[in-house]
Image (cartoon, rainbow, N blue to C red):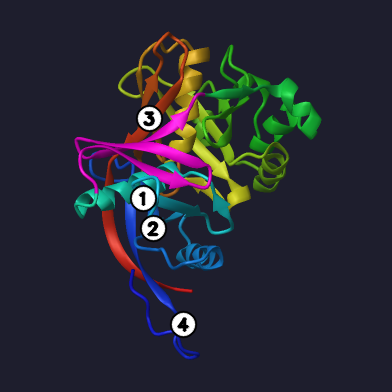
Amino acid sequence: MTHAPDTADAPRTVTMQIVNAFIRDGAGGNPAGVVLDADDLGEAEMQAIATNAGLSETAFVSQSRTETFKLDFFTPTRRIAHCGHATVGTFSVLAARGRVREGWSSKETVDGPRAIRIAEGAAFMEQTAPRYSDAADWAQAGVTRAQVLGALGLGEDDLIDGVAPVVVDTGNRFLLVGLQSTETMRDLTPDLAALDRISERLDLIGFYVFVALEGETDATTRMFAPRYGIPEESATGMAAGPLGCLLYDRLCRRKDRLLVEQGAWMTPPSPSLLDIRLTRPDGAITGLMAGGYGRVMEERVIGY
């Protein structure tokens, strides 16, 4: 990490790698900031850098006493425990620089350690077994199913048959909402202020809206996280993991690997592909790995 002189007239700066994670056919993906060798940065400094960078998430990489590296993640507005695309971006940079190799490594986070695997150039991150919270569980937080649908501008007829909106947690909490048609997905105009209020009450990262598909990919998605300063995101590994679990557990997609696309419905589009590998030794999901490919796009100097 490079610092400019710390004087009254010269603000401090860091060098940041901008990495598109979960790229599809070499393009698209979700840009994340990666700051290497960030050991001397405090939380306030990390937050200022992430805010000034203006990306949905920035990862700060430092030494760890227990794992391969320590990663701290920040959105433009607050710290976040885990971030899939910033993890993929970080380990893509580390692999390109020879600081990790094919096979297993790990990251230390504020929420504990997670395994990382580099496989044929793709980076995968560990997530935990899913925990589900249905609409009946939201009542104590003052949230109803009708409020959730209203915030997304949806009616009951828009929902997929047999799978109600549900909060799924594999390390971060997302509210998953299945739709019947891609046309409804395309035309979504959510009330971001209402999503923010519901997210605060249910302690969500955001809302992950999906349509189940038949073919190469298992679902197409959109993700809204205004509580974390993200109106919409083009690839969200920590949301695709919960969706993979939901597809397996409640939509009977009985397979170990599921592919999720995201970003195709944004303006402008940024098509992304997320690869979910479920661990289910006795049929029940005990964990998963979510991953994909990353590509360094540019290097920036960010002041703070």
In the rendered image, which residue does mark 4 sit on?
Answer: 11
Amino acid carrying mark 3 in the image: Met
Amino acid carrying mark 1 in the image: Phe
Residue 166 vs residue 47, the one in the foreground? 47
| Circles 2 and 1: CB atoms closer than 8 Å | yes
In the rendered image, which residue does mark 2 sit on?
Answer: 62
Circle nearer the viewer, 2 or 3? 2
| Circles 2 and 4: CB atoms closer than 8 Å | no
The alpha-carbon separation of the residues under discs 4 and 3 comes to 40 Å
Where is residue 49 shown, x and y percent of the image?
Answer: 48, 67
Q: For the residue carrying disc 1, how many other residues have a C-alpha within 10 Å: few (<14), some (14-19), or many (20+)?
A: many
Amino acid carrying mark 2 in the image: Ser
The alpha-carbon separation of the residues under discs 2 and 3 comes to 23 Å
Q: Looking at the image, which residue is at 68% across and 30% down?
A: 149
Which residue reaches farthest front? 65
Q: For the residue carrying disc 4, how many other residues have a C-alpha within 10 Å: few (<14), some (14-19), or many (20+)?
A: few
Residue 79 among those drawn in magenta: no
Where is residue 143 shown, x and y percent of the image?
Answer: 76, 32
Relative horizontal placement of residue 168, taking residue 89 as reference (left or right): right
The range drawn in magenta is 100-129
Q: Is residue 188 visible?
A: no
The quarter of the picture where residue 22 lies is top left
In the rendered image, which residue does mark 1 sit on?
Answer: 69
The alpha-carbon separation of the residues under discs 2 and 1 comes to 6 Å
In the rendered image, which residue does mark 3 sit on?
Answer: 289
| Circles 1 and 4: CB atoms closer than 8 Å | no
